[in-house]
Image (cartoon, coloured by chain):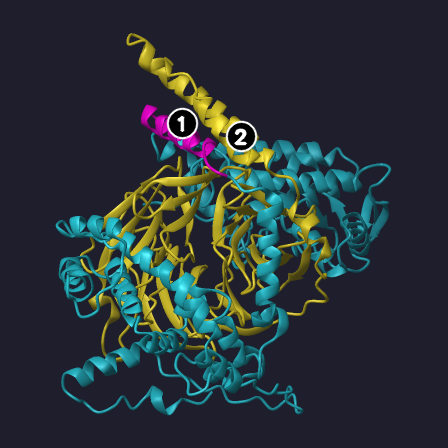
Amino acid sequence: KYLSTFIKTLKYMRSPPTPEMATQEVPLNETLAHLKTESETLKSKLEEERAKLHDVELHQVAEKVEGLGQFVMKTRRTLKGHGNKVLCMDWCKDKRRIVSSSQDGKVIVWDAFTTNKEHAVTMPCTWVMACAYAPSGCAVACGGLDNKCSVYPLSLDKNENLAAKKKSVAMHTNYLSACSFTNSDMQILTSSGDGTCALWDVESGQLLQSFHGHAADVLCLDLAPSETGNTFVSGGCDKKANVWDMRSGQCIQSFETHESDINSVRYYPSGDAFASGSDDATCRLYDLRADREVAIYSKDSIIFGVSSVDFSLSGRLLFGGYNDYTINVWDVLKGTRVSILFGHENRVSTLRVSPDGTAFCTGSWDHTLRIWA
Amino acid sequence: MTINTLAKGGCHREQMACFRKMEKVIVAMQDPDMGMKMRNQRLLITVIPHAMTGHDIITWLTHKYRISEEEALHLGNMLVKYGYIYPLKEPRCLVLRPDESPYRFQTPYFWTSTRWPASELDYAIYLAKKNIRKQGELMEYEKERYSLLHKRINHTWDFVVMQAREQLRASKQRRKADRIVLECQEQAYWLINRPPPGVNNVLDTGLERPNNFSCRVTLNSDYYKREIEACRKALGRNRVKSSICLEGFLKYSEQYLNHDPIMQGCLPSNPWISDDTAHWTMNAEIVPVPTRLRVERWSFSFMELLNDAMGRKEFMTYLEKEFSAENLYFWQACEDIRHGENSKIVEKVEDVYKNFLAPGAARWVNIDSKTMDKTLEGIKRPHRFVMDDAQMHIYFLMKKDSYPRYLKSDLYKNMLAKAIVPQETKKSVFPFMRRQRHSSPSPAQTATQAAEEEGLAKGAGANSAAGSHF
């Protein structure tokens, strides 16, 4: 009850009207400076407000939880076939197939279990930084330096050239950094170096909604696993992680605590929080109801940036792929590092846990992908 | 579109941040009190002062960061790869060996971060020095680069040669030990900044990202106005105390612990480890009898039940018994509108109206009048989200009412009772015998087959269905 009164009081403490409303003859750049200052002041005020309700740390709450024992995960499959840096991968809903893309423009669909390559496409551009498997398993989407996201229906006819059926869906004004199908094969969400995210209708290529609010390249996105399924989170070079309403295009929550580019964002399985991985060598957890950062996963000996993060099925473990070729495994609740995995011979650029949580896959600049279990 | 793998003008922010951190480690290693003990190391007949062994480095890192030896070796290797420590024995091999091999700290003058990026001119001078000092000392790839540079910066070649000669003359006046050290340091610097072919270029950071925020997005008054508006909204938002939110994580992790194969393993075995796909077969989308864990999961949340095809089917059966199946049909139809093609929205909305909302509809759904009015009004101009309010109303109706009763019903209880608990398959007794890994029909094929069957039957695909052997 105290809480609601407190918040009501806050609502009455409005800021004064912006300077530009008061005077009309102030030169343009002075107004910009005022706006910038006001924006920064409000941001600090926001952080103060967020801190007020932070009465306990996650690791304190987690003291009563049993610690995790020795952790053994090994490489169970190594997928060789890319001729250059692997930049992105995604799992098929069938829990064993994956799609991967690389710097040399190749997109390959594998049955990771048998390590057989099932399809291969050569994109007309290099640096294919984004790829995604359609929920039906019948198509893949990919894009990169071509500024587009294209959808390729997967045909099993050996004679058919996959590139012939390609469908251009998204068009940005800079590189495509990430893409994801929503709940069906019919819509794709994209993020780009042009600082925006966008939602597209696959069939027509029509732009359904665009999302503006990042101040620099958007590098990653993830869809929320919520009941009403209408939000997603994005991270960018402006160190911000933004949560968006897909219907209205509005940014509904924003977090700015990282010290460098955010390379990866991933929702906690319940949808109440998300994790981020950044060039500042930390992973962080943000709770959406508390509206703040609630945990930082870092260690003195970890110097290099995180390229990619994902949770285990129960959300107890957070896996991070790092630029120093390793994978660090974190206990999400206690904040401790449970294990470090070696194997790749160059940067780990992408990491995803399989849909049923039996394994996770990493892609690396060493041209290979590995399945760990 | 060009890619800058090494910035021509400014520095890569990401790289510089890493360099600074590594430099902190290096400085700590050289701390007079807490740093490493260094001694003289013998190299052939010369004695090099201030050197340490690979083993020393690993031990120090292990203690300082409280990490395992394996991790310390890895971290130490990074320091060598990035040129902060260089080997005295086998100087061209930038690897940290966990033995008595001697290493030395690179002088800050030759840190990559000091003069970034390394200039072509400096490289030319370096190669020229090597060439002059001992004819034929240049490696093949260095010779190639040397002649390339000669062509490219031919106009300053006199300067290059002059500088090289000058530097060689100066070095001859140094003690032999110092001269060797300087040569090693310089060689290490160039091995990193101009790596030989076939060696990973550690300075490669991929696609260049903007150094400056406003590169791609104009930070104009509109941008700041949006930021201010967003902040104001955020200030007014309801927040939940941390002590309440954070408990949620504990509960969730505990509830799903047994369902997390990486944490607790899975039955009968993890296919990736045992090469046996039984776990996947038992948990396929539709099976005659589901596993116990799967049925239990339906009780965790309404969303879990609906997300599972079998769960949803069971729930539908239950609703049919209760004569409220129209709710689930309606919800599914709304989902189809929300996630379907743009072109089919109008048609689908009409169908939904006819089947669920129109007075006397076959599957009329019971929505409160306010929502119904709003929806009917919206249908006049149908769009993707026109059914959202109605859909949510029905969703919560099912969630609060039908779902809890389903969980208490005999239908669910029986399902739970006869659900399978698979036997754990022990790992193979003979570790050398590996199971054959069978392939599975691609989801793409099942769809193609269905499409073919709709048209002309061409005969089932002869390839994947049979399964190819490893």
Q: Chain of mark 2?
A: A
Chain B's shade in the image?
A: cyan
Q: Name the residue: 47% across, 25% down.
A: A42
Q: Is residue B26 visible?
A: yes
Q: Residues within 10 Å of mark 2 (few under 14, many from 20)?
A: few
Residue A41, horizontal then vertical, whole percent: 49, 23
- Please say whether residue B229 is one of the residues in the magenta stretch: yes
Q: Is residue B207 above or below residue B54?
A: above
User: Chain in yellow?
Assistant: A
Q: Main secondary structure of the magenta part?
A: helix
| Amino acid type, label 1 | Ile
Mark 1 or 2, closer to the camera: 2
| Amino acid type, label 2 | Phe
Residue B81, horizontal then vertical, whole percent: 63, 51
| Quadrant containing the N terminus of chain B in the rendered view | top left
Q: Is residue A35 above or below residue B464?
A: above
Q: Which residues are magenta?
A: B220-238
Q: Name the residue: 63% across, 63% down.
A: A342
For residue B228, which numbered disc appears in the image? 1
Q: Chain of mark 1?
A: B
- Please say whether residue B401 is one of the residues in the magenta stretch: no
Residue B37, horizontal then vertical, whole percent: 86, 45
Is label 2 in a helix, a strand or a loop?
Answer: helix
Q: Quadrant of residue B354?
A: bottom left
Is label 1 in a helix, a strand or a loop?
Answer: helix
Residue B255, horizontal then vertical, whole percent: 58, 65
**3D distance between C-alphas at marks 1 and 2:** 22 Å
Position of residue B98 in the picture relative to residue A305 (left or right): right
Q: Nearer the viewer, residue B440 or B20?
A: B440
Residue underneath mark 2: A6
